[in-house]
């Protein structure tokens, strides 16, 4: 559905995105991640047709992303929902539908329903809360039933209840259309997305199915009562352990990087050897995907 | 074509949904009435045709001022109001620019035509022809169209409301000042400088009640050129 091949975007002498290559199949919910300045916004703007790539090929449902035909199959929700505050909700969504060539009220009703706006359909936009404005932004992006939905920070500024509703809406929307969702919150991505595209300094750092990307963290994190030195002696020669490193400033919290060919029961073997050596094992865990910082720390280490 | 009218209709009605639209219309109409009584009629005895001529000249200047304010609403920027909706819709840049232009022109035309009761007073109480009034108002609408086309180009280039308004005001003032400059200085290009001034140059025939095709063509070309620049600038932003 989305095919990017060596896409680059230059602003003068500065490359915001370099040689971006990825594919997102129909029905995928792609989490677009990256630190500030990584190139996320530029990538989203290219997907939405707001700016054309300087080089490379970016195609949406077979259309060049910079073309009018591509804009007809994309729905875009920027970080600040695009609204005319002088309009009422239904009138605004109807206007958005007509701009996209949809002149039927059924499309408008469906979009209002999907975005949970039926009860405020007659309200002026300037009286709505941030959460409802975000929903109106979603409704205008959905009203023409696009094949590709591009969402920039859709949960930013929402309260927990609204976040849960947005998640439920995304769950309802996935399947039929490809969704690209940008966020700083890796936890949200881990929960909602099935594909990841991680950008770093304008380049693709990681991309692929979420399980493949997040499952790559072959490591164990241990909390001990004893000494790291003693642990090293105990685990010397332990199959499947590639390296041992202290995590942060606490010398009793260590991280074991596992080898690619580590046996499935490596955690059991490590625990047994530590206990048999008389070292206190307070906890042992596989690191869960945490925040974006943790992911990038791992990427930096990998380099 | 349908989306073009959709954009124009939304922008046109938006002016009448906002207090600024009403305040601006009220201000221009008040100033029109004031200038008729205080300047055009004044204390000097003048033939009614001269009164109408002076009224139309001042009204044309006020139209240019109105256009500079209207320019505040012409930018289409993805970070401003629903600019992202327009720019991500499958609508060509030409339709976006023309739609917004027509919406704004509709508003300027309504405000202009609402002042028709003022020359009607001269028509009733003096000796002027209906054709003089009609030609004068055709000229006012053309001044509005030309000014708005410049405003559209300024909005596409400046992108921000105040930038668009200031650029529009600057360009219009520059064109009018060129005419004044040509009047006071012995310049080689005096005819050209005179010919490019919308109000003090090209509007002269209209305020005198004369229909000159060359002046109509000037305003049509100015409008076309302004809209063309605006369209190119908007398209260029996608490539930038």
Image (cartoon, coloured by chain):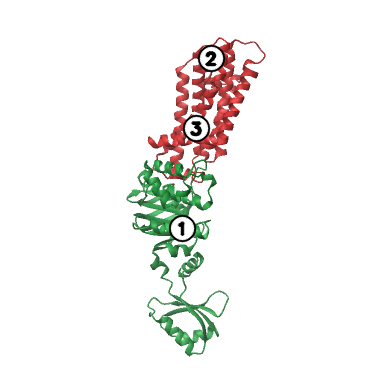
Residue A165 image label: 1
Q: Label 3: state its secondary structure.
A: helix
Q: From the viewer's perspective, is A196 left or right of A224?
A: left
Percent coordinates x, y for residue A242 in the rendering: 44, 78
Pointer 3: what residue?
B104
In the image, are marks 3 and 2 on the same chain? Answer: yes
In the image, are marks 1 and 2 on the same chain? Answer: no
Distance in Å between CA atoms under marks 1 and 2: 66 Å
Using the image, name the chain to which the residue with label 2 belongs: B
Chain A drawn colour:
green
Quarter of the rendering containing residue A215: bottom left
Percent coordinates x, y for residue A53 in the rendering: 41, 49
Residue depth check, mark 1 versus mark 2: number of the one nearer the observer: 1
Distance in Å between CA atoms under marks 3 and 2: 27 Å
Pointer 2: what residue?
B208
Relative depth, front residue between A232 and B68: B68
The quadrant of the picture occupied by the N terminus of chain A is bottom left
- State whether residue B218 is above or below residue A95: above
Using the image, name the chain to which the residue with label 3 belongs: B
Do we see residue A53 in this rendering? no
- State whether residue B218 is above or below residue A166: above
Q: Tell me which chain appears red.
A: B
Relative depth, front residue between A103 and A296: A103
Q: From the viewer's perspective, is B172 left or right of B235?
A: right
Residue A130 image label: none
Sequence-wise, the earlier of marks 3 and 2 is: 3
Quick one: which residue is furthest to the left in this view? A62
Using the image, name the chain to which the residue with label 1 belongs: A
Q: From the viewer's perspective, is A267 left or right of B128?
A: left
Q: Label 2: state its secondary structure.
A: loop
Percent coordinates x, y for residue B153 in the rendering: 49, 34
- Asked if the residues shown at circle 3 and circle 2 are in contact, with their CB atoms under 8 angstroms apart, the answer is no
């Amino acid at each position: 559905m989305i095919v990017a091949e060596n896409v680059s975007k230059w602003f003068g002498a500065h490359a915001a995105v370099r040689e971006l290559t990825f594919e997102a199949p129909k029905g995928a919910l792609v989490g677009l991640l990256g630190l500030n300045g990584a190139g996320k916004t530029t990538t989203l703007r290219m997907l939405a047709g707001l700016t054309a790539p300087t080089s490379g090929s970016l195609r949406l449902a077979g259309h060049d992303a910079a073309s009018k035909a591509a804009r007809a199959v994309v729905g875009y929700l920027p970080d600040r929902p695009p609204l005319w505050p002088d309009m009422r909700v239904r009138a605004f969504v109807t206007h958005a539908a007509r701009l996209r060539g949809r002149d039927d009220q059924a499309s408008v009703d469906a979009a209002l329903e999907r975005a949970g706006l039926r009860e405020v359909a007659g309200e002026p936009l300037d009286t709505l809360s941030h959460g409802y404005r975000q929903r109106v932004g979603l409704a205008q992006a959905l009203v023409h039933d696009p094949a590709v939905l591009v969402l920039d920070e859709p949960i930013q500024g929402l309260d927990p209840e609204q976040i849960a509703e947005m998640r439920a809406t995304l769950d309802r929307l996935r399947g039929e259309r490809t969704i690209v969702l940008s966020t700083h919150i890796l936890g949200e991505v881990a929960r909602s997305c099935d594909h990841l595209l991680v950008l770093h300094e304008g380049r693709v750092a990681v991309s692929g199915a979420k399980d493949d990307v997040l499952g790559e963290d072959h490591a164990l994190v241990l909390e001990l009562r004893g000494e790291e030195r003693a642990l090293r002696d105990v685990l010397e020669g332990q199959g499947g352990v590639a390296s041992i490193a202290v995590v942060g400033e606490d010398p009793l919290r260590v991280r074991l990087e596992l080898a690619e060919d580590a046996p499935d029961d490596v955690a059991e073997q490590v625990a047994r050897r530590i206990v048999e050596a008389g070292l206190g094992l307070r906890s042992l865990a596989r690191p869960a995907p945490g925040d974006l910082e943790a992911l990038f720390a791992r990427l930096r280490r990998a380099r | 074509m349908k989306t073009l009218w959709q954009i124009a209709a939304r922008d046109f009605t938006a002016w009448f949904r906002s207090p600024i639209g009403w305040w601006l219309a009220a201000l221009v109409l008040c100033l029109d009435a004031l200038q008729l009584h205080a300047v055009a009629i004044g204390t000097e005895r003048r033939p009614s045709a001269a009164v109408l001529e002076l009224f139309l000249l001042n009204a044309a200047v006020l139209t240019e001022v109105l256009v500079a304010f209207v320019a505040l609403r012409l930018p289409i920027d993805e970070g401003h109001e629903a600019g992202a909706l327009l720019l991500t819709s499958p609508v060509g840049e030409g339709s976006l620019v023309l739609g917004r232009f027509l919406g704004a022109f509709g508003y300027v035309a309504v405000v202009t035509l609402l002042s028709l009761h003022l020359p009607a007073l001269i028509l009733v109480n003096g000796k002027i022809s209906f054709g003089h009034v009609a030609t004068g108002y055709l000229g006012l609408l053309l001044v509005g169209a030309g000014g708005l086309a410049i405003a559209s180009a300024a909005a596409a280039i400046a992108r921000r409301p105040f930038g668009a308004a200031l650029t529009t005001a600057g360009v219009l003032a520059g064109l009018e000042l060129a005419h004044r400059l040509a009047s006071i200085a012995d310049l080689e290009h005096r005819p050209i400088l005179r010919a490019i001034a919308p109000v003090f140059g090209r509007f002269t025939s209209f305020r005198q009640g004369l229909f000159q095709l060359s002046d109509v063509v000037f305003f049509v070309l100015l409008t076309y050129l302004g809209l063309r620049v605006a369209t190119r600038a908007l398209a260029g932003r996608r490539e930038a």
